[in-house]
Amino acid sequence: MKQKRNFQFSTLHSPFKKFIECIVESILTASGAITSIIILLIVLFLFKEGFGLFKSPTVEKGYMLCVNASNPIETLTSQQIKQIFDGEITEWNIENGELKTEGENNFQSSTLNFPLEIMIFRFDDIFNLYSDEELGENYDLLPEKLGEVISENPNIIAFLPEKYLPENNDVKTLSSTHITPADFFLGKEWIPTATPAAQFGVLPLIMGTLWVSIFAIIIALPLGLGVAIYLSELAEERTRKLLKPSIELLAGIPSVVYGFFGLVVLVPLIQKTFKLPVGETAFAGSLILAIMALPTIISVAEDAMRNTPRTLREGSLALGATRWQTIYKVVIPHSISGISAAVVLGIGRAIGETMAVLMVTGNAAVIPNSLFQPVRTIPATIAAELGEAPVGGTHYQSLFMLGCILFVITLIISITAETISKKQPNKGL
């Protein structure tokens, strides 16, 4: 009788249940579709803004470089412009319309018939040469006066706003070039605020990121695997139940707290121990990242080891192997895929970290020669400079390009971790 009532109840409510199930399925499907579309749009927006960098001019937007019409120079690279205005290149040494550096040509073979020494002229210099009355009301005569200065100095190079460019036959405007992928990916200087040509060489940032991340993994890997082996094979059940959640809790601590700990404790300790001028170094960043990567490595590796079949352990022991021989010969080889996945996930955690690294690495955008030098990583650069970059400007687009690089690195690491995890014989991970 009871079964009959239940059947009637189920029959009466089945259309309603199906309706609810259809609504739930539709909501879940819509959520998945919307989430996928949003992620795709974010990635497209990231790459669209990033690749806009290569459409940006070498010289600051709204400005041009002018020389005397007798000067055979036709174009300058971003690096050459920076070296000229920094005083590193002081003489015109031109061949076939291109500026040659000291090692590329003999100055005596220059085809110029005017002084070789370069005369740098910035826009503000005009106000030291002429009074406001001479420049006219609302600076109407400013382009004419600029033309006079350039005409009188054949060795000049002038950095001028486009709106005040002189219309003079004795003035030649250098052809504008764009930032190239080679300038960005092979450049060795990251000076986004330099004028007239900002430098967007990403090599120092990539090298800083790799140095900090690789040494963090070198430090964290043996420690993490040691703790994982202890928890999986040696620790008592009560000890494991106490330590495992405690270690996993470390992953939930905000990175800024790790950074504060590193800044207050590790940085002074490193400076005092190694007698360095500053303690904010790549080594300090590696130590902090190693501490932050430990919970991931320990947790994933320990899970992989504990999923080793008990029969394998017992068979090894039954054959006369010691506990350590069983761990070394049976457990670790069986869980090697999971251990590899733990390492890859730890690397991903280290490369993507921002705040802690920003606080302890010194933020010097130079290619490091030693672990005890200040460095700057890609995530730290984005976090430090995005607020100061004008929206839509070249600096803004270069930071998005850094995001593209970080996205590609993270994607490769995620695919690698996924591939390694799928090879694991057990499904515990």
Image (cartoon, rainbow, N blue to C red):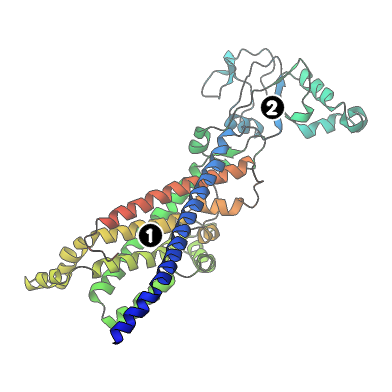
Q: Mark 1 or 2, which is nearer the eye?
A: 1
> Residue 169 at x, y = what percent?
76, 15
Q: Please, is residue 118 above or below residue 410 in the view?
A: above
- Is residue 154 in view? yes
Residue at horizontal 41%, vertical 70%?
A: 15
Coordinates of residue 254 in the picture (x, y in percent): 51, 68
| Inter-mark Cα distance, 1 to 2 | 48 Å
Q: Secondary structure at mark 1?
A: helix
Q: Amino acid at mark 2?
A: Leu
Q: What is the secondary structure assignment of the residue under circle 2?
A: strand
Query: In the rendered image, which residue does mark 2 sit on?
Result: 65
Q: Earlier in the sequence, mark 1 or mark 2?
A: 2
Q: Is residue 190 above or below residue 422?
A: above
Using the image as rendered, state which of residue 302 and residue 22 is in the foreground: 22
For disc 1, the marked residue is 346
Residue 374 can be seen in this image = no
Give the x, y percent position of residue 19. Answer: 43, 67
CB-based contact (under 8 Å), mark 1 and mark 2:
no
Please identify the quarter of the rendering in which residue 424 is found. bottom left
Q: How many marks?
A: 2
What is the quadrant of the C terminus in the image?
Answer: bottom left
Q: Quadrant of residue 395?
A: top right
Q: Image point 82% across, 25% down: which residue?
A: 143
Which is nearer the eye, 297 or 48? 48
Q: Which mark is residue 385?
A: none
Q: Is residue 412 left or right of residue 145?
A: left
Mark 1: few, some, or many residues within 10 Å (few <14, many ≥20)?
many
The residue that appears at 30% across and 87% down in the rendered structure is: 2
Label 2: how many residues lie within 10 Å, few (<14), some (14-19) or many (20+)? many
Q: Amino acid at mark 1?
A: Gly
> Horizontal and vertical percent for residue 346?
38, 59
